[in-house]
Amino acid sequence: MGALRSVIESEARDVSQPPSASAGNGPARVIGRILTYLVVSLGALLMIVPFLWMASTAFKGGSAFDYPPTWIPDPISLDNFREVWTIVPFDRYLFNSLFVAVCVTFGEVLTSSLAAYAFARLRFPGRDAMFLMYLATLMIPGQVTIIPNFILMRYLGWINTYEGLIIPTAFTAFGTFLLRQYFLSIPRELEEAARVDGASYFQVWSRIIMPLASPAIATLAVFSFMGAWNSFLWPFIMVNTSNMRTLTVALRSFQTDYGTEWGLMMAGSLLAMLPMLVIFLAAQRYFVRGIATTGFGGR
């Protein structure tokens, strides 16, 4: 009975004790989470407001500057979209942008994956120093290399050509760095087993590394496509004929010395955004996984 009494008294003391500090953090944690959601929601709202205004202006027709301003077009008009397709060869500009973006994406994924595999797996003298020099090019602003690149393109006769729009932008140090970090996380045992079976370095790269690195490949592809699709300065310098313009350069034609056709520009911008939105939604699962699993350490 004495032992039972001691156990009961011990349990009573435990029950009478105040809750631990960690249990008291529950309400504070909930409040902190609510505040975080509010801040994030406010930031998202601020970012989406320009898009909503662009869509509203695109559907307003000729009433883009009515006072007081309204968010919901009344009536909803498709005149701006019709004029965009008739005033300028919008379909040609759309094809140019799509062709350039696809080629740049393919070239960057191909060259970056090959270079990343070499830096991640092959051992050769000066590898680390070369990789650091390669990364150092990320600190050079793109505007600094525009004039040398333009002179080179003119020497090669690539002004107003697809080659001039694609080749200078199909090689980036960022893509090599991103894929190298992911390749370092792939177990070497898989490659060693393939090498024992007689696979060459190219076969290991194409049959083992690339399939396993699909999340990082998708991430790089989305970044590359988005950069090529939204590029303005380089196409603006390289192209001076109408049939070679990309969408970003073509949208600039709605702004003249006499004013800006805001309705047409907003309609064209909305149409130009749709392919990028479709690409992102289609690759979202791989994109998020690639961002989450790509490391920035290791050797």
Image (tube, helix red, strand yellow):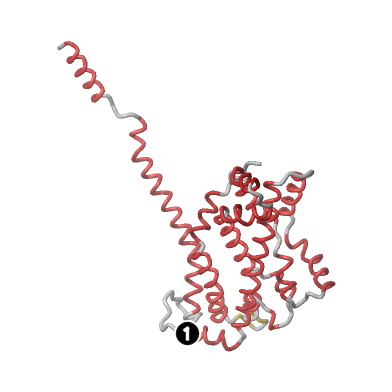
The residue identified by callout 1 is 78
Q: Residue 85, located in which quarter of the rendered image?
A: bottom right
- Residue extending furthest toward the bottom: 86
Number of numbered discs on residues: 1
Look at 68% across and 78% down and name the residue there.
245
From the viewer's perspective, is 182 left or right of 80? Answer: right
Residue 125 sits above or below residue 232 on the image: above
Q: Considering the numbered disc 1 on the image, is that residue within a helix, a strand or a loop?
A: loop
From the viewer's perspective, is 241 left or right of 51? Answer: right
Depth check, front residue: 28 or 224:
224
Depth check, front residue: 299 or 85:
299
Residue 248 sits above or below residue 134 on the image: below
Q: Quadrant of the C terminus?
A: top right
* Image coords of residue 56 (percent x, y): 47, 76
* Image coords of residue 160 (percent x, y): 75, 78
Q: Residue 297, located in which quarter of the rendered image?
A: top right
Residue 71 sits above or below residue 7 on the image: below
* Image coords of residue 262 (percent x, y): 56, 79
Q: Are there few (<14), some (14-19), or many (20+) residues within 10 Å of tag 1?
A: few
Look at 68% across and 81% down and name the residue there.
257
Depth check, front residue: 35 or 236:
236
